[in-house]
Each structure stands twice: as C-alpha cells, then as structure tokens.
Amino acid sequence: MASREYTEKSGVSRRSLLGAAGAGLGGAVLLSPQTAFASSAPQLWTQPDHVGTPDVHGVHLQFGSDASREVVVSWFTPQSVARPRVLLGSAEDGFGHSTPADTATYRDAASGTEVFVHHARLSGLRPDTDYMYAAIHEGTTPMIASFRTAPRGRAPFTFTSFGDQGTPTLGKLGTSSTGSQIYVNDNLGSPAAGDTVTGIERVAPLFHLVNGDLCYANIANDRVRTWSDWFINNSRSARFRPWMPAAGNHENELGNGPIGYGAYQTYFTVPAPDTDAEVKGLWYAFTAGSVRVISLNNDDVCFQDGGNSYVHGYSAGEQRRFLAAELASARADRDIDWIVVVMHQVVISTADRFNGADRGIREEWVPLFDQYGVDLVVCGHEHHYERSHPIRGQQPNDTLTPIPVATNLSTIDTSQGTVHLVIGGGGTSAPSNALFFDPPQCRVITAVGPVGSNGKRPPVYVNEDAPWSAFRDKEHSYGFAAFTVDPGDRRGGTTSMHVTYYAVTGPFGALTAVDEFTLVRPRRDGAPTP
Ligand SMILES: [Fe+2]
Ligand SMILES: [Fe+2]
C-alpha cells in the first residue's frame, strides 16, 4: 500500500481535506491556509492509494442519550479497515480532535457476507452548536459533513418522522412478461423512497424518527446490498442529522442474531440501556430540548406473525419494565414537557385488508401510555397517514377499543389523552391509503392461529368501530410529518407542538401540507415539587 500519511492536529480545514481528496493526484499535497474555513497553518497531505480500500460508506448519525452533548458517527465496509476514526471540528476553526471508531460486525446468514460497521462516539459536545466532521479510515477519501447538537432546556426545534421506506433501487434479476431478463425491486421499494429523503431535507429537521420497516432486507434477494442501498439513499440526510430508528417486523431477518435483529443492531448505535447483547438497542430513549423520545420494538408484544421468525414475548417483560421506568422518570422530570414514543406496529388503523391494529400493544403498552400521559405516538406498519383523537382508557371489549377524550381537530391538549399518528408512507411500493373503511372501522388482531402450511401463524381479526379516528389521507401515498416544538414563554405556562403532515411528490421532494394541527400541554416546570 502506498503511503497515506496526513496530519490530524488542529487546523486541517474542511476545504483543505476536500482539496486533497479531490485532487486525484498521488504524492504529497501542500494545503493552503487560504481557505473559506479558516486554517491556522499549512498541512501536509499524502494522497492515499485507493486501490483495494473500501470507501467510507453509508455515513449516518445517531444522538446519544442527551442529544445536546453526544452524537455517534457510523459507516460500514465489507472488510476490516485500519484506524477508522472521526475528526471533529467547526467551520471557524477547522478539524481538530480525532475520535477512534469501534467496529462491530455481523455475518449475514443468507449470503455469508460479513459487514463491518464503525461507530465513533463524540461526547462532551456543546448544545445547539454546528460541528463539521470527517469520517475516515486508512487509504480512502474522508467523508465530510456536519451536524447540529440539540438545544439544552426549553428551546424551539423541529423534528420529522416516517416509517416503511424501502429503497428506490433494483436488487433482483427477474423475468418480464415477454421473457426478457430485467432487474426488479424486491424489497417493497419505489422511487418515492428517494423522494421522501429529499423532502426531509427541505425541512432540515434537528433529527428524523424512522418508524420501523426501514429497508425490508428480510424479504430481499440480497440483504446486505439492500441495507447498503438504504444507507446510500439516506446518507444524504442522515449524515447531517440523526435518523433515530425503531425496529419493525421487517428488521427481523432469519439467522441474523439470536432473535433476528442482528443487522439492525449492528448498523445502529443508539442510547440503549445496558442489557444482554441479544436485545441491546431494540429499545432506548434520548432527550432533545424538553422532549423525551422513547423507541420501542413492538414485535415483543404484537400477536401478528410479521417477521422472518415469530419472536412474540422475546424480552420476557424486560422491555415493558424499561418502558415503565422511562415513563416514570420522564414524567417526574420538571425539565421534560413532552413524551414521544416511536414504534412500528399500530394501536389504531382504519385500513381494510392490510395489517390492522394489534391487541398486544393495547394490552401491554397503552395502559402505561395512559398512566404516565404519553403525549404522542408515531408509528408505521400501515402504509398511509392517519391520526387519532387524543385517547385515554379502553372499552372492556374484545379489542380494547381506545376511548377518545376530545374531538377538536385543530388544537389538542395531550395532557388529556395520547395522539397516535400512523406515518407509514415512507416510500414502499405497497401503499394502503386506498384501503380505508368508510365509515372508519378498525381490524384488530386479537390472537393468532396455529402455524399454517406457509410457516406463519394466521391472524385472528375482530372488527371494531373507530370513534377515535380523526383524520385519514386517502389521496396521497407518500409523505412525512414535521413537529415544531414551541417551549412557550413562561414557567408553568403552555408549550405547544405544531404538526404538519406533508405529502411528498417527485424527485425534488415537492411538499404539500395535507394535515395541520397543534398539540398543547402545560409545562412541567409549573408542576408542584413532589
Ligand atoms: Fe411496512
Ligand atoms: Fe411492518
């Protein structure tokens, strides 16, 4: 391998790195200090030999538990690489501090391919601050991007959310109706899976919540390529702002890890509690401003047999104990106003002939959401957009029908009840917005039958009326929701969260506001001291 030395001391500027990487010449390059990103002194750069070295691939970010202080930078390669690390800096001062990345691996059980994922944890960051960074390993071009840390305390910011994306790529050689060989998408993807990313970048949120069913690798011919395609498509957003995921049923891949989430668990480093490696990262929480976000994996409690393997009950109550403890501590925290849950399968849906809602979530999670006053739940699984009225309590029937506590469509007090949003139009080729019951009803999976000839447990459905149904978007298949937090201006006053659901069309992410409303609740800093 040719020499590939360069300096990492303070002062290597963004433009300098770009200049060196873009020069395409071997040998040493003397970097100029005359850059747009002020540099303190000339630096020596030796152009690496690229042959045989994998690129810095699929760069994506995750927040730590405190989004104002910690960010993890991640990327992956098909082989081990030397000295994976992240150089951190700012537009004003250039790159300085170098943080080594830890490398995690998994071997895809279907292909035997091993994937090496590099995670560099950047700690001790300043709140509400823009940083530049360069992700790099030996012998390749650095990937340079930026991020912004969350504000600390009560401050305005915007986040976004969708689920059920897939990829806009072709992964399988098939046969056309005329017998010719053509490539097809085999992971429920469509061109819209690219458009929605462009749409997110138009809003440029602080972070994006991904409500499960990320890339549908578990049904794809080439799972590793499918994950790669997903990260390539999304890195144009996820390297600038954390995409914080929840695992969906399509993250369950046969043979990958003890319960099927090994790929998902390897690609992401989320702020998870200390648990057995088998379940690590499947549930976690983080704080941004006055918002506590809790991510859950619903396959633990759902009846539906929706993954490659049936893992109902896999945590033996550990995830529920985490949720109860997280909710109790968030509600006792006078700095936290909003509790937002991101998860995949749904408590409410008015689509016919699709998945439906799952009684398992209504049994296991919803009483806790009620007890601790969760404000907002975002999910996917159903491939459309709809929202509920605020719900609290359940009817004593077979389906545990949620009870709406208010019907105002424009302003909703979430201290009275939890608003659920289904945001499953991230880009799949199988939208469900044309399948709504009219008038609204809900198919609820209340149990599963014995394993059938296809190896799956068939769902047992019970239909219910849907008095909790507030809005459905019948017209558009794809989009995302944006949430803008306004902390309010006085202690003990009201804080609000303005919500807009945008339909997305076209390669430039054209946005149409389809549904707009405002969530309000009392600030917790006015609560009596316990
Ligand atoms: Fe899905
Ligand atoms: Fe799903």
Image (cartoon, rainbow, N blue to C red):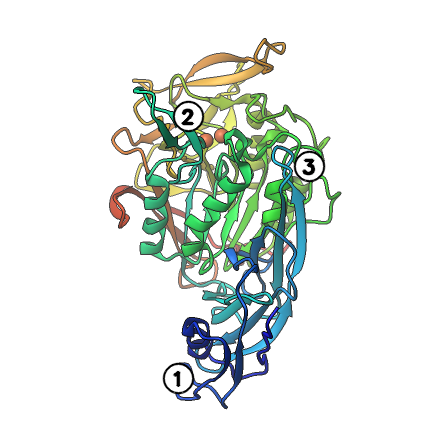
Please name the residue that numbered disc 2 is placed on: 349
Residue 79 seen: yes
Structural distance between the alpha carbons of marks 2 and 3? 31 Å
Give the left or right position of residue 263, taking residue 188 as reference.
right
Q: Is residue 69 above or below residue 500?
A: below
Q: Earlier in the sequence, mark 2 or mark 3?
A: 3
Query: Tag 1's secondary structure?
Result: loop
| Mark 1 CB near ligand 1 (8 Å cut) | no
- Of the 4 image quadrants, the one containing the N terminus is bottom right
Q: Which amino acid does label 2 sit on?
A: Ser
Total numbered labels placed on residues in the image? 3
Rendering coords of residue 102 (x, y %): 67, 59
Please name the residue that numbered disc 1 is placed on: 35
Identity of the residue drawn at 59% across and 42% down? 264
Near mark 1 (Cα within 10 A), the count class, few <14, some 14-19 or many ≥20, is some
Near mark 2 (Cα within 10 A), the count class, few <14, some 14-19 or many ≥20, is many
